[in-house]
């Protein structure tokens, strides 16, 4: 697996680098030394022929320090205002440091709506591809200034995973304030050991991760594990490494083993299936019986009304909806051909009975196979 890791680094032409808040900030504001170091390393990788997309946290933390607040505000308007102040300072520092190496930057601020809407998703992809073709470094952050709970991406670990999938990147490097995934929380247990390679992410892997964020960030180790799960499903490796370790990016690409390497799956999801599985926020759920679960998971079938036993929430035609088994395990997500109200009327029925109940039958399937993605993971 270590040899596979070296191959991935050697062959990676398009790389997403995520830089966390705790690397980018210090007590008096932005960590300018860290920004200079990472910028220099990214420029060297670009000069070697790689394309780099940078997902950068730090706007909120920068704004908190710049305004002189003791901590991140609780109220949404104040958080958004702090992010607006901090983002300006953050991008200015990046622009200044990249200019030292004769590189230009572009600021991209996104919400989940930009990635869940298929047209906007493709537009974002085209814009980023154009910037990379122009040898401009895209610097991406969540648009905290306008984000509300319904359109938040959650944290920049998730955003970095989404961008990796959006851009068909070859590798995701997550730089944080810890060396990687440990057997225990190293902040609490002295005997904790670094896990160099994670062959597959299971529930036991998630149990190892602490979901306690740092003082300035929003995501902890658990959010990084979830990000790794998403990109690994698409056949992309991810590494967690300590961002303030001297020349960490250069060392990784020179073949040195640092951090925790998450091995990608060989049977990877297709691009549109990744969008379905990981970019859409579910509007509800349907619970299905064991026969339907087997048909979808084992036989590659669509979801028919006969296999549905319950409907959760209200949603319209075309909405992204999770489907669960009777143990409440989420099996996947798909785009429904019927509204929640109509599914409640036809659930448990044969397809030939749909027209008699609804007065119309545009589809046999509640979710067609082409419009669903399986996300169930091993319970080991």
Image (cartoon, grey):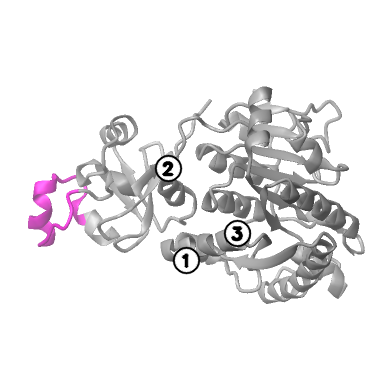
Q: Which of marks 3 and 2 is in front?
A: 3
The mark found on residue 120 in the picture is 1
Above or below, 214 against 121 in this view is: above
* 3D distance between C-alphas at marks 3 and 2: 24 Å
Rendering coords of residue 287 (x, y %): 33, 44
Q: What stretch is highlighted in magenta?
A: 345-364
Camera-side residue: 178 or 273?
273
Mark yes or no: residue 53 visible: yes
Camera-side residue: 29 or 105?
105
Circle 3 Cα neighbour tier, 10 Å, few/some/many (<14 / 14–19 / ≥20)? few
Would residue 35 be found to the left or right of residue 378 on screen?
right
Indicate whether residue 175 is drawn in magenta.
Answer: no
Q: Of helix, strand and loop, which one carries label 1?
A: helix
Indicate whether residue 357 is drawn in magenta.
Answer: yes
Rendering coords of residue 145 (x, y %): 65, 73
Q: Which of marks 2 and 1 is nearer the N terminus?
A: 1
Mark yes or no: residue 211 visible: no
Circle 2 Cα neighbour tier, 10 Å, few/some/many (<14 / 14–19 / ≥20)? few
| Residue at figure coordinates x 60%, y 31% from the top left | 263
Instruction: Name the residue tied to disc 2.
Output: 270
Circle 1 Cα neighbour tier, 10 Å, few/some/many (<14 / 14–19 / ≥20)? few
Rendering coords of residue 305 (x, y %): 21, 47
* 3D distance between C-alphas at marks 2 and 1: 19 Å
Q: Quadrant of the N terminus?
A: top right
């Amino acid at each position: 697996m270590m040899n596979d890791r070296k191959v991935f680094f050697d062959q990676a032409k398009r790389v997403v680098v995520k830089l966390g808040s705790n690397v980018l900030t210090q007590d008096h504001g932005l960590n300018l030394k860290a920004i200079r170091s990472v910028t220099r390393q990214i420029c060297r990788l670009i000069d070697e022929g790689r394309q780099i997309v940078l997902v950068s946290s730090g706007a909120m933390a920068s704004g908190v320090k710049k305004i002189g607040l003791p901590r991140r505000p609780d109220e949404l308007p104040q958080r958004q205002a702090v992010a607006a102040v901090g983002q300006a300072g953050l991008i200015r520092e990046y622009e200044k440091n990249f200019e030292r190496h004769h590189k230009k930057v572009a600021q991209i601020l996104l919400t989940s709506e930009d990635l869940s809407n298929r047209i906007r998703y493709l537009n974002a992809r085209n814009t980023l591809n154009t910037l990379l073709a122009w040898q401009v470094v895209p610097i991406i952050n969540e648009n905290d200034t306008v984000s509300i709970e319904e359109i938040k991406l959650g944290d920049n670990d998730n955003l970095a995973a989404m961008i990796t999938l959006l851009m068909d990147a070859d590798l995701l490097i997550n730089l944080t304030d810890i060396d990687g995934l440990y057997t225990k929380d190293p902040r609490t247990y002295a005997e904790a050991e670094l896990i160099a390679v994670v062959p597959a992410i299971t529930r036991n892997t998630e149990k190892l991760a602490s979901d306690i964020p740092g003082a300035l960030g929003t995501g902890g180790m658990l959010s990084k594990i979830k990000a790794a799960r998403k990109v690994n499903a698409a056949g992309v490796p991810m590494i967690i490494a300590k961002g303030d370790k001297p020349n960490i990016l250069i060392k990784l690409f020179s073949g040195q083993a640092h951090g925790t390497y998450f091995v990608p799956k060989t049977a990877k999801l297709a691009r549109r299936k990744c969008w379905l599985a990981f970019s859409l926020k579910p509007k509800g759920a349907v619970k299905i019986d064991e026969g339907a679960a087997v048909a979808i998971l084992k036989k590659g079938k669509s979801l028919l009304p006969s296999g549905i036993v319950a409907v959760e929430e209200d949603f319209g035609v075309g909405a992204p909806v999770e489907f669960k088994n009777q143990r409440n395990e989420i099996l996947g997500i798909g785009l429904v051909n019927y509204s929640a109200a109509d599914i409640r009327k036809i659930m448990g029925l044969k397809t030939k009975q749909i027209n008699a109940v609804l007065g119309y039958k545009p589809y046999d399937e509640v979710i067609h196979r082409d419009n669903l993605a399986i996300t169930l993971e091993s319970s080991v």
